[in-house]
Image: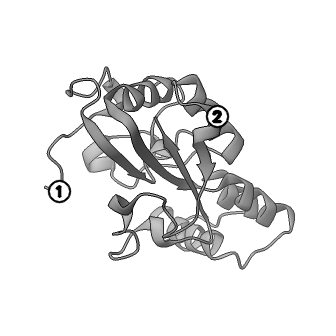
């Protein structure tokens, strides 16, 4: 296991941590998997556990990019090609371009043996909606900014890009940082 704390976000009530005890939070392709009903509580608890000037780095699918690629009718967008291959292999289905884009918002879980029949992607974000959610959780608007792959303001995240991860897929990911 790669974590000290395991959290079931479907039943999230809070992190088992004291207030102001965490320096940094790195959440790569996590928040699209958390229900729209639970995300506000998770963001608020991230804010609660961060120390003053602590930093959260969030990487999620960039819905704006997927919408742009859909509107441009780009069948060759690598994310859409991958989703089309997975649909054919896993579900024996031929995805339309809209279904490829829709998976930024809602998608089936490929871990049914572990999670049962539930959605993998349950939420979608662009910069403005993520910024608004973080502000509602307590972060000040001026501390929330768009970032880029391997362009963090925090040295604790220098590991980004050193191992295989969806965070490395900068062509389709949105990078956002906020400090408390």
Residue visible at 51% across and 25% down?
A: 137
Left or right: residue 173 versus residue 46 is right
Give how far across and how far down residue 43 sits, in percent. 46, 30
User: Which mark, by number, is residue 55?
Assistant: none
Residue visible at 54% across and 29% down?
A: 36
Task: Give the label, 1 or 2, closer to the camera.
Answer: 2
Label 2 crowd bin: few (<14), some (14–19), many (20+), radius 10 Å: some
CA gap between label 1 and label 2 equals 32 Å
Query: Element at badge 2?
Result: helix
Give how far across and how far down residue 109 sits, in percent. 42, 50
User: Which mark, by number, is residue 2?
Assistant: 1
Query: Element at badge 1?
Result: loop
Residue visible at 57% across and 70% down?
A: 170
Give how far across and how far down residue 72 sits, in percent. 86, 68
| Residue positioned most to the top | 13
Residue visible at 34% across and 34% down?
A: 50
The residue under label 2 is 141
Front residue (pair 155, 146): 155
């Amino acid at each position: 296991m790669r974590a000290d704390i395991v959290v079931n976000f479907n039943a999230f009530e809070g992190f088992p941590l004291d207030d102001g005890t965490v320096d940094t939070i790195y959440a790569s392709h996590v928040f699209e998997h958390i229900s729209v009903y639970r995300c506000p509580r998770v963001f608020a608890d991230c804010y609660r556990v961060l120390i003053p000037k602590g930093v959260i780095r969030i990487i999620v699918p960039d819905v704006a990019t997927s919408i742009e690629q859909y509107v441009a009718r780009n069948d060759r967008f690598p994310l859409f090609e991958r989703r089309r291959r997975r649909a054919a292999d896993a579900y024996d289905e031929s995805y339309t371009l809209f279904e490829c884009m829709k998976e930024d918002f809602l998608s089936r879980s490929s871990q049914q043996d572990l999670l049962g029949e539930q959605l993998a992607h349950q939420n979608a974000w662009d910069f403005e909606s993520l910024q608004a959610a973080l502000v509602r959780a307590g972060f000040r608007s001026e501390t929330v900014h768009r970032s880029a792959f391997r362009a963090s303001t925090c040295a604790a995240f220098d590991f980004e890009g050193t191992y295989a991860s969806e965070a490395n897929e900068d062509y389709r990911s949105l990078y956002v940082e906020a400090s408390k």
